[in-house]
Amino acid sequence: GAVVSQHPSWVICKSGTSVKIECRSLDFQATTMFWYRQFPKQSLMLMATSNEGSKATYEQGVEKDKFLINHASLTLSTLTVTSAHPEDSSFYICRAAPGTVNEKLFFGSGTQLSVL
Amino acid sequence: QKEVEQDPGPLSVPEGAIVSLNCTYSNSAFQYFMWYRQYSRKGPELLMYTYSSGNKEDGRFTAQVDKSSKYISLFIRDSQPSDSATYLCAMSVSSSNTGKLIFGQGTTLQVKP
């Protein structure tokens, strides 16, 4: 099956610093990538939809100036958490698809962010 | 009321048991239903994908959809310790990969040897 690589898998940072998370589709091109956040014992919440070459579409309540998304190529999307605070500590997961149907969606392995 | 409701568990069963995981939903427009398995600190992996009422079987897994009752289930036969994970249901209105997926809270399953 298709592989979506996400790095880093775990990051610890000080409050006020910025953290970049990468999501790569290794063996397919992904026009669209999705970014989710998951708090412990809670569901995946969609943060934004990233389209190659254009601005990301953010869900209501997600601060676009805090969560910067870049989708510069068909195989790479990045999420940057700017000026991170302890409340941003969460599990972040990307999702991508090689085609147009959601049956063939693949998730990255996730990134656990801990802000001290 | 949440669009998708899923009992968070935890659910603990002995090895070999039949496991039943369930989700209810309120939006009758949902047409596509998925079950994902998520191990701790990992991304979810797709187990089952269905788009009609009825049953779909894949090995030890059976997905059941009852649109009239707005209820979906995942059955695991002959459960194994390796099945211990969180199981998430998800559903969408569209089959398009740009369609929004709505996830349940996830049910944590532990299969004891």
Image (cartoon, coloured by chain):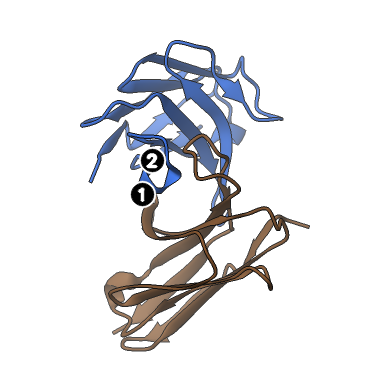
Q: Residues within 10 Å of mark 1 (few under 14, many from 20)?
A: some
Q: Is residue A96 rendered to the left or right of residue B113?
A: right
- Give the residue displayed 58% in from the left and 27% down from the top: A85
Chain at tag 2: A
Q: Secondary structure at mark 1?
A: loop
Q: Is residue B40 above or below residue B85?
A: above
Q: Is residue B111 rendered to the left or right of residue B7?
A: left
Q: Residues within 10 Å of mark 2 (few under 14, many from 20)?
A: many
Q: In the rendering, which numbered label is found on residue A110?
A: 2
**Which chain's colour is brown?**
B
Q: Is residue A95 above or below residue A67?
A: below
Name the image quarter holding the C terminus of chain B.
Answer: bottom left
Chain at tag 1: B
Amino acid on which disc 1 is placed = Lys
Give residue A25's quadrant in the image: top left
Asked if badges 2 and 1 are on one and the same chain, I answer no
Q: Is residue A20 above or below residue B27?
A: above
Q: Nearer the viewer, residue A40 or A49?
A: A49
Q: Nearer the viewer, residue B20 or B81?
A: B20
Q: Nearer the viewer, residue B8 or A14?
A: B8
- Give the residue displayed 70% in from the left and 55% down from the top: B3
- Percent position (x, y) of residue A113? 45, 35
- Percent position (x, y) of residue A34? 47, 32
The residue that mark 1 highlights is: B42
